[in-house]
Image: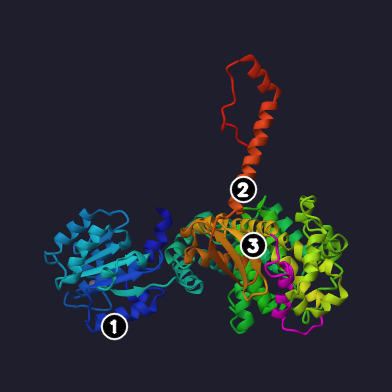
Amino acid sequence: MSTLVLARKYRPRDFDSLVGQPHVVQALANALTQQRLHHAYLFTGTRGVGKTTISRILAKSLNCTGVDGTGGITAHPCGTCNACREIDAGRYIDYVELDAASNRGVDEITQLLDQSVYKPVTGRFKVYMIDEVHMLSNHAFNAMLKSLEEPPDYLKFVLATTDPQKVPPTVLSRCLQFNLRPLAPQTMHEHLVSVLVQERIDAAAPALQLIARAARGSMRDALSLTDQAIAHGAGAIDEAGVRQMLGAVDRGHAVRLVEALAARDGASVVAAIDQLRELGLSAAGTLEEMAALLQQMAVLQVVPEAVDADDPDAAAQVRLSTLLAPDETQLLYSIVLHGRAELALAPDEYSGLVMVLLRLLAFPSTKADKSPSASHAEVPPPRTASTAARPAVSAAAVSTPIRSATSRRPVSPIDDRRPTERPAGTHADRHGASPTPAVELDPSGETDRPSTSQTTVASMASEPPPWIDAPEASSSRPASGERPDVAVEAASARIIDAAPLGLDSQRLGDRWTETVRRMIDAGSIGALVRELALQAECVAIDTAATPMVWRLRVERETLRAASHCDKLQAALAEAVGRPVRIETEVGIAVDSPALREAAERARRLAEAEQTIENDPLVRALMSQYKTARIVPGSVKSL
Ligand SMILES: [Zn+2]
């Protein structure tokens, strides 16, 4: 295979030329020099970090006879003796490499171990290298264990695995373990430069940087990608070609997006994404580039002198690192990382990208004092007007209409759907009667706002995601001077119905169902936890408690396992944007998301069956064929 040419050609043949893993090299070299040899070594680490390479060098070190044939065990194998040459060529009789991923059966291992009773044919040591050792069957492990317990002097084991967790402890405890680390992009970059100099191939530094990043710590992958880049670029490696080959997005787009977000310029964000769409550049790739950029910005914000002068993007990183506050950088990084999972759920990946990136603008800026363009949240900068005209709107534009609309018309969207069941006044009445955390935390709110409007802000809560309300916290209390977390606490108390345990069961059910759907859409809960969420009825939400308490009623004891509850609690905290505690009780759930789904399905099915029965064609058929009937259950709603 031509793609392995460089990786094979430049496989290090001694410890001195090995790239990376200095801690492993040091320990092995010392052991060899001092002849303190262990009989079994375990190398762990992801693919392509050098496990097989180190094993071969170790085998040579143990068996090298030196240039003149009189050498002994050495940390510097000569590379010219018979043992060194044959191990390099992969045909040394006393060095056996076995890939457990393809030789899983107990047979191969027992065969190998049977042969281990014979002394080495030509060398000092027999060295058995078993790669992906975690793939061995239990029988094979047991067979090997005997040899590991009482190994003959001449037998050495080198075990390698990408998944040490799956290696039985009885085996682990008999091995000297070395953890091989993924290589740093800079280390790989340097090695690629030296390889290409030897190959006399022109390569642009930014192109190699891209390859080094894409290889994710695997030198073998980096060299394979370099092979591909040479083929792709017809002998030379340039940045544009490598970007195209990797499907990578030009870092310039990521820079422009971060710039627009730092300036809170929603219009430019949308325009930049339109441009990505026109160029056909991947939305996921854009988020990846942005994550890498934000990570470097975050480092520069903490360690300004950590500038990598060789990085073609260094200047942009330095500039951007001053435009965003460190906490905003962290927030955007988190939004960008988690946003990747959302892209697949969006109607199309670019509209998904718009939503993910505009999310930052839904949070109040913490950099208001430093950036003249980002004025206070309550007084939106002039460009917000143009932003609001676009389909995607900024946070300020979203939150203002909600507030004004609700104060005019004190009915929640949920109430709108069931006007007869839910007269508008009921919440307000109950609300006015109970002391609320919002009032305690924000005494001014009671006097300058009618209680109905406060209630309806609360009852809106089950609709918008938690971040929509966040700007309100700062805009309604701009000069309070309180710690920001207190302001957020106050806002959150108002997000939920302000009266602890005060939501009626219908609205608790609405809120729980909507929240569960959001967690499922975000992919934040796995199968069993999802089952718990869907089967549970929310019987109370206590916003006054710290952290706030969600009380769930579950029928099946098995679903209440602490591990499920912990995971659900973490996902819920993320969904509502504040710490929560989940309490569960055993009982029959009468209003769970699952029951609501079942009811909805039954309703749609009945509707579909009705439609079918009323269909003129079906009616004609039925009257024509007297025995024709609609098979019960065969109608499916779409
Ligand atoms: Zn040698």
Distance CA(mark 3)–CA(mark 2) = 44 Å
Residue 535 x %, y %: 55, 55
In the picture of the structure, the residue carrying the numbered disc 1 is: 30
> Could you tell me which residue is drawn at 27 percent across and 57 percent down?
137
In the picture of the structure, the residue carrying the numbered disc 3 is: 250
User: Hey, what amino acid is under mark 2?
Assistant: Glu
User: Hey, what amino acid is under mark 1?
Assistant: Asn
Give the crowd class for mark 2: few <14, some 14-19, many >=20 residues within 10 Å.
few
3 or 2: tag closer to the N-terminus? 3
Give the crowd class for mark 3: few <14, some 14-19, many >=20 residues within 10 Å.
some
Distance CA(mark 2)–CA(mark 1) = 66 Å
* Badge 1 element: helix
3 or 1: tag closer to the N-terminus? 1
Contact between labelled residues 1 and 3, with CB atoms less than 8 Å apart: no
Q: Is residue 315 magenta?
A: no
Residue range corresponding to the magenta coloring:
478-504
Q: Which mark is residue 597?
A: 2
